[in-house]
Every structure is written in C-alpha cells, then in structure tokens.
Amino acid sequence: MTEHLIIQTNRLQLRPVREADLSIIHELLSIPAVDMYNALGIPTNKAVTQVYLDEWIDNFRLRKEFVFALCTLDTNDFVGLISIRIGNSKYKIGSLWYKLLPDFWSKGYATEAVIKLLQFGFLQLHLHRIEAGCAVDNIGSIRVLEKSGMIREGHKRKVLPLKTGWSDNYEYAMLEEDWEKKRAN
C-alpha cells in the first residue's frame, strides 16, 4: 500500500492528502462551524496547518494513519478529510475521524465515506475494531456514525476541551464481526 492508494465510492474519491492540498485543508480547518466540536482548534496560520499536513503525509507512508482528501467524482471538488489512525498492532484497533466543508453537510457524503473507510479498515488493514467519538451535541456526526452501522458503546463525561468548555463525548465502535454481518445482509 502506497501513497498512491485511491478509494472510490459512488460519488467520492478518497485519495491521500498531498502537499498541494495545504490551502484547501487550511481553509477547511479555519471554518468556525467545522471547528465547533473539534478539540484540535483553528490553526493560527498556514504554517500550523503545514505541520499537520506533514505529519499526515509521513504517517501515511509509515502506515500509522491514513488521511484521505474527499473529492467528488464528477467535478473533483474538495469535500473534506477522513482518516483512520492505527493503534497498537497487537490490538488491531483503528480510530476514525472526518471533517467536511459545510456545503457538503447533510447530503450523505460523510456516511458514504465512513462506510468505505470501515470497509478499508476491515478488509485491507485487517483490523478487529474501529472506533470513533463525537461530542454529545454533534447531532450530524451522531447520525453519520449510526447510519454507518457503528454502535454507541459509551458516554465519557467532560473529556473534550472545546471552545465552549468541556464537552461529554459518545464513543462508537464497529467490530470485524459486525462488519461481516452488515455485509451479509
């Protein structure tokens, strides 16, 4: 698996992030609505975004984290980012996150991308478990994770340091066997 890995859904292409994406990634990360439930925070300038981008590119090469740019198949418009980070190899666990431009919210793109990343995680990376979390007030992400077939397993109290204060977090996961059952139906 190389940095040339391309994954497609019905409407999206998931391709590894690259240096040329700096401006569009910085724009995405700088939108207050995108940052609302994000503990990362808005980057103060492009140099900060460059540090994130360099780390994502290095981690992809090292197979530690796979950060993909989401682009529409028909027009190649940038939609957002999606990632699966690989934990300790003994446990075969991945954790996923995603961020989309607001123009693409509530149109099924995030769900489509999450389902494809779950497939990638279980079938290509041979993970046993894939996890995701979201702030309890992030109704959009709750819907995406549940429509994707992930199961809410927990509720952590005041774990996310958001701009609005400490937020509770819902913990979601899917096991390899859950994925197999989903595929069988």
Image (tube, helix red, strand yellow):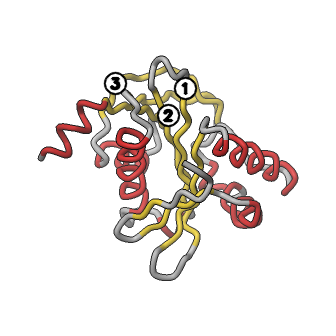
> Could you give the CA–CA distance between mark 3 and mark 1, rounded to whole angstroms?
19 Å
Callout 3 amino acid: Glu
Residue under the point 42% across and 64% down: 8
Q: Secondary structure at mark 1?
A: loop
Residue under the point 61% across and 42% down: 38
Residue under the point 49% across and 34% down: 95
* Marking on residue 133: none
Residue ranking furthest to the top: 90
> Could you give the CA–CA distance between mark 2 and mark 1, rounded to whole angstroms?
8 Å
Given residues 54 and 171, the one toward you in this image is 54
Given residues 72 and 155, the one toward you in this image is 72
* Marking on residue 87: 1
Callout 1 amino acid: Gly
Given residues 155 and 21, the one toward you in this image is 21
Q: Which residue is mark 2?
A: 95
Q: How many marks?
A: 3
Pair 2/1: label in front: 1
* Marking on residue 153: 3
- The image quadrant of residue 63 is top right
Say above or below: 26 vs 175: below
Residue under the point 36% across and 38% down: 122
Q: Residues within 10 Å of mark 3 (few under 14, many from 20)?
A: few
Q: Are marks 3 and 1 in contact (CB under 8 Å)?
A: no
> Could you give the CA–CA distance between mark 2 and mark 3, rounded to whole angstroms?
14 Å
Residue ranking furthest to the bottom: 75
Q: Are marks 2 and 3 in contact (CB under 8 Å)?
A: no
Q: Secondary structure at mark 2?
A: strand
Residue 100 percent coordinates (x, y): 54, 59
Residue 52 percent coordinates (x, y): 75, 46
